[in-house]
Structures are given as C-alpha cells and as structure tokens.
Image (cartoon, rainbow, N blue to C red):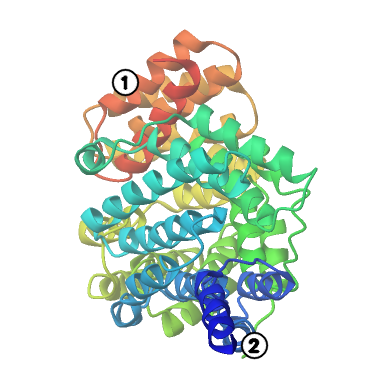
Amino acid sequence: MRFSFLLIALNCLLLAPSQAAGYFDFNTNAQRIYDKIFELRLNEAQSLIARLKLDEPNNLIAYHLENYVDFFTIYVSEDEQAYQRIKANRDRRLNKIAEGDQNSPYYLYTQAEIRLHWALLKLRFEEYLGAFSDINRAHKLLLENQTKFPTFLGNQKDLGILHAAVGTVPDNYRWALEMLSSLEGTVEQGKREVEGVLNAARRTHFPFRQETQVLYAFLLLHLDGRPEAAWAALADADLRAEDTPLHAFVLANVAMRTGRNDEAIHWMEKAPRGEAFYPFPYLDYMLGVAKLRRLNTDGRRHLRDFLRTTRGRHYIKEAYQKLAWAELLNNRPEGYKSYMTLLQSRGANAAGGDKNAEKEAQAGIVPPLVLLKARLLYDGGYYQRALDVLASQAESSLPSFLAKLEYTYRKGRILHGLKKYEEALAQYNRTIEQGQNSEAFFACNAALQAGLIEETRGRKTSARAYFNRCLSLKPDDYSTGLHQQAKAGLSRVGQ
C-alpha cells in the first residue's frame, strides 16, 4: 500500500505544472527595473535584473528587461564594437523566452519586442536585410498575439507604430519591405491604434504608458507632420528632465523641432550627469547646436565634448561643420576652413546631415554670413530676428545662383514660421521654379512645406499636388527624409 501511494504521489507531481516552468510577471520589481532603464541608470538596472533572476529565477520578464538595457546601451552610444560583441544576446534571449508559458500575452509580445529592438539597432548600422527580417517576424508574432489576446495593449502599441511607419517607407527601401514582409498600413491607421492604447491606458494600468506617449509624440512629429500636436502630446507624459537624460532628450528634441529653442536649452542644462547615468554624448551635440541657433558661440564647448566622448560615427561631420560655423560667426574665416578640413577626415557620411556637411566642405565655398545667421535663427524659432537679418541684405547682392536660391527658400521658411502663408507660398513657388533642376534640396523641401501649408488650410487638392511635386524632385541631400514626409502627407490628404 505504501509503494502504491508513492507511485500515485509521484505521478501527480509529474503531471502537475512544473514550478520551474518559465512564466511572465511584470510585477512591481519589474516595473522598478523598467523605470531605472528609462532613467538611463543602466548599471543599477543590470544589478536589479541580476537580483530579480535570483529572487524569481523563472520570471522570464527579466530577459525582456535585459534586452531594453542592451538596446539603450547601443542606441545611445552607437558603439559598433559593443554592438558586435553583444548581438548574440538576441538569440539567447529568444530561445529562453520560447520555453515560457505560451498562455501568457507576454509570451509572443516579448519575442516581438526583442526583434523590434534589434531591428532598430540593425538599421542604425545599415544591416537592412536583417532589420527588415526581424520586423517581418515581429509583425507576425504581434498579429498572432492580437488574435489570442485582443485586449492586450502591448500588441496594439507596437502594431500601431509599425502601421504608421510602413506607410512612409522611402522608395529606396521598399524593395526589402516587399521581399521580406507583408506589412501594410498608413499613418492614419497607426495613429488611431496608438490613440486607442492611450485612451485605454487612462482606464487601466498599463506599464508601458509613458513609452507609448513618447512614441505617439514622435509619430505625430516625424510621420504625421504635426509638430504642435507632438508637443501637446508630451504635456501629460510626466517626463522629468531633471531626473533622467533620456527624458531631457525627448523634451529637447521635440522643443527644437517646434521653435522652442530656449526651452530645449533649459531641459538639456537640467539633465543629470555623472557616473549613475549611462553617458549620452548626443545631448552635448544637441545643446551645442541649440546655443548656436541663437548665435551663441558658447555652444562650441558642448560640440567639443560630443566629439571627445562619442563612440559612434554619426553627427561627427555635422559637429565639425557647426564648429566651423561658430568660427564664421566670430569673424574667423580661417578657423572655418580649418574645421572644414578636419571634417573631411572624420566620421562617416551615411546620414543626410553628415553628407550635407561633407558636401559643404568639399565645395570649399564659405556660406554668406547673412544666410547662415538666417538659417540658424529660423531653426531656433527666432523668426522675426531671422527676417530682420535677411532684410539687412538684398538678394541681388549675393554672389551665386545657389546663394540667391537659398535666400528665396529661407525667406519662405521664415514667413511660414510667422504664419504669413500667402507670402510664404510665393517664395516657395519661386524656389520650386528656379531650383527644380538643382541638386540642392531647396526646391524639394519648398514643395513639401507648401503642401503642409495647403493641408493646414484644408486645400487637399493643392496639398496633394505639392506633395507629389516633392516626390518628383530628387536632390542629393535629405531626399529620403523629405520623400518620407511627402508620403505621409499623401496618406493624410489622399492619393
């Protein structure tokens, strides 16, 4: 009888769910770690993850959090050596999570998130095939999870962002998307989905609420062409620039793109620094540029700090270009030439801004001071000051066709900023007509901006014509980003 009892007991133990099986519990410990990650306290977060693994060895959320640490480590530093060293973590974590509870909404969601994180990193290092393959697989995982758990907000967050982004993929990348993915969507569709997540998050606890609010603001800014709406979207995101450099970056980034340059400087100067936080060199670059936009050459020290500490290869040429511009503002043309010479042997020219900086250096043409000042002041949102600077010199006095074309373009942008739409359109039309055969981006962006004006005024037919005009122009610089915005515009006003 005793032997039979032991057999029955053993059989029950074998049939019962194993206590060692992996599960997913985004509990208060996980939330604390997640918050530390978004504060860029990555060393502290790693220590807490190690403790979570000891205290809750079967809670597979630890691997999702671990992946966030890797993502921010690489995305913030742009350290390619570190990227190559830790990229194998992706498959190791996916394999671990695949052993978890398949009846949890986090089972497929965390696999999709890990793939999306690494897709973004691969795009950063120009591994396009691998990136689109990860995006494709993540999309399928999210769709499957949406079927199984239709009320799980995490699915809708990621699907919304993917649907918005895919509608604006530039033509030179569509081949990879079409070959590797069945992903389809529009900005409007994605926006509605993310808005649905945020509305639901007001009624229930959603651990990724703040992350979703930031993603929504960037969607509005970069994909939907609505900078003021993007700024408003951050109003209730509870961002704390004084507590975390990542929050300072988000606020400053949107502020600098919405004419709030002084606010951006304020947030970046409040950003905490020190050993507790993972280094964020790009903040120094942004701060240097922001100060230069109000013609304050004190920004040079921040640009030098960026060049000294960055481990990436982006923005280096742009930083040297901005240092060169500061020399011009200080009436030192020889200093300008010195920095432009350095620029040509430093950094990479993969991104639009770096390409543009190298092109300026190779041309060897010193930009007219009136255009440089007007450009910087406009970018900072100091529109009246910029207009006054242009008014101080006649267009006809400029030395070349390209300088005259830029004068017309800059005047249009400034009048646009001042909401003098009819006057701005007149300048944009002149720019398009005169610059349509130029390799410069002025005509292409003038068409995009004219489309945005007409869209704002509810003139969809005219807006559509301008967006299509933008797509028909293929300048050497910035064409990918300009065409992406024009595609987003067409998705809003109709093809």
Compare residues 135 and 467 and report the one nearer the observer: 135
Q: What element carries label 1?
A: helix
The image shows residue 319 at horizontal and vertical percentages of 41, 69
Q: Estimate the spatial distance between the alpha carbons at disc 2 and disc 1, rounded to whole Å.
A: 54 Å
Q: Which residue is drawn at 55% across and 48% down?
A: 379
Between residue 280 and residue 108, name the one nearer to us: 108
Q: Residue at x 63, y 69 (%)?
A: 38
**First of labels 2, 1 by sequence position:** 2
Which picture quadrant has residue 378?
A: top right
Left or right relative to 87: residue 25: right
Q: Residue at (52%, 42%) from the top-left corner? A: 148
Which corner quadrant of the image does residue 402 belong to? top left
Residue 396 seen by the camera: no
Which residue appears farthest toward the front when viewing the image? 1
Q: Name the residue under label 1.
A: 433
Q: How crowded is mark 2: few (under 14 residues within 10 Å), some or many (20 or more)?
A: few
Q: Which of marks 2 and 1 is in front?
A: 2
Quadrant location of the C terminus in the rendered image: top left
Residue 27 appears at what percent x and percent y? 70, 69
Q: Compared to 422, does 361 lie above or below?
A: below
The residue tagged 2 is 276
Contact check, label 2 and label 1, Cβ < 8 Å: no
Q: Is residue 144 depicted above or below 461 in this figure?
A: below
Q: Which of 229 and 238 is in front in this view?
A: 238
Q: What residue type is labelled 1?
A: Glu
